[in-house]
């Protein structure tokens, strides 16, 4: 990933403004530690912080067309850039960067080229011939993007909120799958796949078609000039990512440069379910497996930094982001710049435990559609920003445009959880990779039930967070919560604690409006809370709340860690977190 | 390098304080991007940001003795840690980190162990048994360190000023070669080498002894578990570093892990003298050579960030830090975490051009002593902070404790510049590596005259900086300069420009007092300006000012036109040169 910041039409071309833009752009330096660039055209500034994954030697940005009349700053990966280059045979390319095609496609097709891009991206393109610009964000919002407006009539676009929140009168999330055109002064949706209308599809389930589509999505994402690995929690999704990556690694350009050995990474509290599960999968696949053990205190010490980076006060997202944030630093320290990860599968296939209670296939399907549309505010946000905080890029094959089309065209009857037929959640995905002759994964792993991310790292993680919040948020504070935070009022001490931190970093009203709210049970949308009348009374957002669904949930209840920072927790603070290379 | 921050005895053990210390420690994250740690003992906090060079897997800090009663946070490299471990046979070590010996040495020897360490370091050690602490800094001040005091009675110690400037009532540079002990409440100098008294030494010059000492200093610094390279400007010092490294790389543990091909890096404006000179040396040595071309605009765009990181308003340091800062980011992006660099030679051997005018050997020698003692405020500051800004570590073999002892014991008569005897500056060093049978460098490089760092990257770099400053600093501002900045008043528009930026980041009075000032010509101390009556009239700090000494100084045209932002900076891997086999 990279970091982009554009300030357009700010009526100020002074050195002071340039210095200010450079300063704001440096707030995104963690996203692109490798190099930075700025292009100034009158009162328009395009800035870039680069993480070099493709063509490290020459792909510095901004990028240009032949005569430098069109300038682009991009955060993204264009997986089909080689084919696109072939279609642009009359164009001369200046770099080997995959993002170089954007300027040339615009020259050829105007604003209508965006759906031709297969990949993830956020970009701002400045056409100096008529001083117009366009900005766009990928289909699902795998890359983050914010847009803001200044009192001086300027438009601001930034990969993270921190790039523009102090200088804009109003700002908001840039909607995924949309294009903003200065000529029209507004958004236009460029992403119009069949599933978007939420009508119920009827294509019969074909396991092999689904398998093929996923394998393609993974193979595309092996495009890299730098060392990479996979995040492996031992759950179904990450295990499939690891299995498919391991199978297709040999023969790729990446393998030629960095070897055929796949590196896998898992994070957890010591003895956590994920560590055990991931080790088993890593052993089976023969990856070079790295475990990272953290303590509850490590996690709590990181919370402020996590909220600064992730830019949310959503409880589930913060819980799940923290271990990912910690392990990302360790992964980067090993020289790995990119990881492939399993986000998106639960939304596409209805993998969350509460889907057990979906009343019918229509409701089931519509809920998956809602979940996919909201991904950019939850798991995409987490996966992207938790890794980008340390200059690590996360790639998410489940959110491949083609794969989504295939998966979302399946008659949702097949996705329904039907215990009588032996169909647990995500059965269509499991079945697709159930290859008897040449198994991707051992059967018991392929059919293992889900741990939600923040549960899997260790049950005492969430208990620890709650205990910590309970020490620092008083009942009196909770009593006034509605007055202090009328929007998205925190209903738990944990939520209140996160909210205080968020408001300190991002005090603007626009900032708090960028975070979603509303009732949820175990990651459901507000609508799905209606599926079970009992849920309304127990709105803990963790996976375990969907009680009666997961077998192992309350069996392993552990003793609450005594968490009193300052006096006595020597056993928590003094234990060094560590990264272990686990021999297979 | 790493980043350390310690807050000792702050009478506050709350969660809010812990969060504040964590927040301040994160200001040092660039120094140690790989991991962080915090140890709290009552109202004492020891924080650490780690760059993992030795034992990346388990060496996270803080570090402890066996029973965890002694806690230490260290920024440093202890080159003799394996020998020291052997001397501590009755101790159990928890990690493979080179810095772990510190806790155990303290246990064994109390405060008297610091001179046993061969390496560079800043550390804070907390003894929880009696709630006392010590802090220390390496001999020359290669690692940066600041100390501050809070109104609550707390003592603060931080690798960079930005870790403590907002929370201390007073702070200052932690003096190199010193120890601060909470029991005594003050400093004690632990570094007491013979040269420190500035008495004139009399050991006759022996080229082979000097050569051997330098080779030892380089070999020590090949201790690494991660990829590394050398900074190569093509001048004498960096070329010797590269030549000796290349010669001794084979057979080391580093070579086993990362190969015997040495990577070298050079930065410059396109067509600059350094780029040309470095390429020639790289060709000769057969290194994998990387050139990084920047534009004047790139440099100007980086100035604010450079000042924030280097924490100075000294003009020469900022000029020279900027290209190094830019190149460090590129080097790090290639996966290289450590570079060996040539700083210190000019101070030890009187390599600056103004040494041509030294009136006698006594003055010459004393000036070298003064220069070495001031290094921590100039080139050490630059080399360490410009690289650490991007999580890159710079190692400087010329500032090896042993090597300094050897080099500073030589009768300074030998170091004097004597054109009649064909002795140009740093002749003793050149001669030491003039090996006819197995040459380290071709003769014309070995005897090439110096470009000072900020000149060598391209003559238009400094002209560009001056032009930029004169656009943004008016005459009126200069007129009031003495009122606005009574301490170290900027005398040029360029200095004024840097000062404004510095004061924005570090507005406290103690901050401006950490930066040295006073008149200087071409990097001289104030004392040496007396060597030539004309100098006090022309106080430009660049090397070129020492006019009449350097031959090619004013031959070049001075293109003041600053390239605009659309000229790409780039890192070029220069095709591996043919192996030169010298007979």
Image (cartoon, coloured by chain):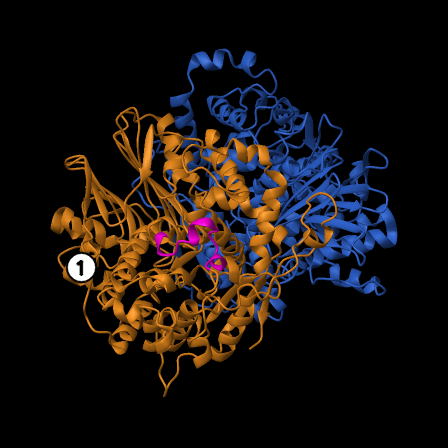
Chain colours: A orange, B blue
Q: Is residue B61 visible?
A: yes
Label 1: few (<14), some or many (≥20) within 10 Å?
few
Which residue sits at x=21%, y=73%? A204
Q: Residue under circle 1?
A: A194
Q: Is residue A525 above or below residue A23?
A: below
Which residue sits at x=54%, y=14%? B484
Residue B503, position in %: x, y?
54, 24
Residue B107, position in %: x, y?
85, 53
Q: Is residue A583 above or below residue A54?
A: below
Location of the C terminus of chain A by quadrant is bottom right
Task: Assess whether residue A536 is covered by the magenta stretch.
Answer: yes
The secondary structure type at the circle numbered 1 is: helix
Looking at this view, is B206 or A195 the one in front?
A195
Q: Farthest residue toward the front? A: A533
Report the span colored magenta. A530-546
User: Which of the chains bears the disc numbered 1?
Assistant: A
Residue A229: quarter of image: bottom left
Q: Is residue A444 above or below residue B500?
A: below
Which residue sits at x=70%, y=51%? B400
Looking at this view, is B528 or B462 the one in front?
B462
Left or right: B91 as drawn, with respect to B522: right
Q: Is residue B342 visible?
A: no
Residue B64, position in %: x, y?
75, 54
Residue A288, position in %: x, y?
51, 73
Which residue sits at x=40%, y=64%? A342
């Amino acid at each position: 990933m990279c970091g982009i910041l554009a300030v357009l039409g700010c009526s100020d071309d002074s050195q002071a403004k340039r210095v200010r833009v450079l300063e704001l752009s440096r707030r995104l330096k963690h996203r692109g530690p490798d190099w930075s660039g700025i292009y100034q055209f009158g009162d328009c500034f395009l800035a870039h912080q680069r993480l070099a994954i493709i063509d490290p030697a020459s792909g510095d940005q901004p990028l240009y067309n032949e005569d430098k009349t069109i300038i682009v700053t991009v955060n993204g990966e264009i997986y089909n850039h080689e084919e696109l280059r072939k279609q642009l045979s009359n164009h001369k390319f200046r770099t080997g960067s995959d993002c170089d095609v954007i300027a040339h496609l615009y020259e050829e097709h105007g604003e209508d080229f965006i759906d031709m891009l297969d990949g993830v991206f956020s970009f701002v393109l400045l056409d100096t011939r008529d001083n117009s610009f366009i900005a766009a964000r990928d289909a699902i919002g795998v890359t983050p993007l914010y847009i803001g407006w200044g009192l001086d009539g300027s438009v601001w676009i930034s990969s993270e909120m921190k790039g523009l929140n102090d200088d804009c009168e109003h700002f908001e999330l840039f909607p995924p799958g949309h294009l903003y055109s200065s000529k029209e002064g507004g958004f236009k949706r460029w992403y119009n796949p069949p599933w978007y209308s939420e009508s119920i599809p009827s294509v019969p389930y074909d396991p092999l078609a689904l398998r093929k589509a996923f394998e393609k999505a993974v193979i595309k994402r092996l495009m890299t000039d730098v060392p990479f690995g996979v995040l492996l929690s031992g759950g179904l999704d990450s295990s499939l990512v690891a299995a498919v990556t391991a199978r297709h690694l040999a023969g790729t350009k990446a393998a030629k440069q960095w070897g055929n050995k796949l590196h896998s990474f898992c994070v957890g509290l010591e003895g956590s379910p994920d560590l055990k599960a991931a080790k088993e999968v890593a052993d089976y696949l023969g990856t070079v497996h790295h475990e990272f053990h953290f303590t509850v205190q490590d996690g709590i010490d990181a919370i402020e930094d996590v909220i600064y980076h992730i830019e949310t006060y959503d409880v589930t997202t913060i819980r799940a982001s923290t271990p990912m944030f910690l392990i990302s630093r360790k992964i980067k320290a090993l020289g790995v710049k990119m990881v492939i990860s399993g986000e998106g599968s639960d939304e596409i296939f209805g993998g969350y435990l509460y889907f057990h209670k979906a009343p019918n296939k229509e409701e089931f399907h519509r809920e998956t559609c809602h979940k996919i549309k909201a991904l950019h505010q939850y798991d995409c946000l987490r996966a992207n920003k938790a890794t980008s905080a340390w200059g690590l890029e996360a790639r998410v094959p489940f959110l491949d445009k083609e794969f989504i089309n295939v998966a979302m065209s399946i008659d949702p009857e097949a996705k329904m959880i039907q215990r009588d037929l032996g169909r647990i959640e995500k059965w269509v995905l499991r079945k697709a990779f159930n290859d008897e002759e040449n198994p991707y994964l051992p059967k018991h792993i392929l059919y293992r039930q889900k741990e939600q991310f923040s549960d899997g790292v260790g049950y005492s993680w969430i208990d620890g967070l709650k205990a910590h919040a309970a020490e620092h948020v008083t009942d009196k504070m909770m009593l006034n919560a509605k007055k202090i935070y009328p929007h998205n009022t925190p209903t738990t001490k944990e939520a209140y604690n996160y909210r205080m931190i968020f408001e300190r970093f991002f005090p603007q009203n626009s900032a708090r409006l960028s975070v979603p709210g509303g009732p949820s049970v175990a990651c459901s949308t507000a609508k799905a809370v209606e599926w079970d009348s009992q849920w309304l009374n127990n709105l803990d957002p963790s996976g375990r709340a969907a009680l009666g669904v997961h077998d192992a949930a309350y069996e392993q209840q552990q003793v609450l860690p005594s968490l009193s920072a300052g006096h006595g927790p020597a056993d928590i603070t003094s234990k060094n977190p560590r990264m272990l290379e686990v021999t297979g």
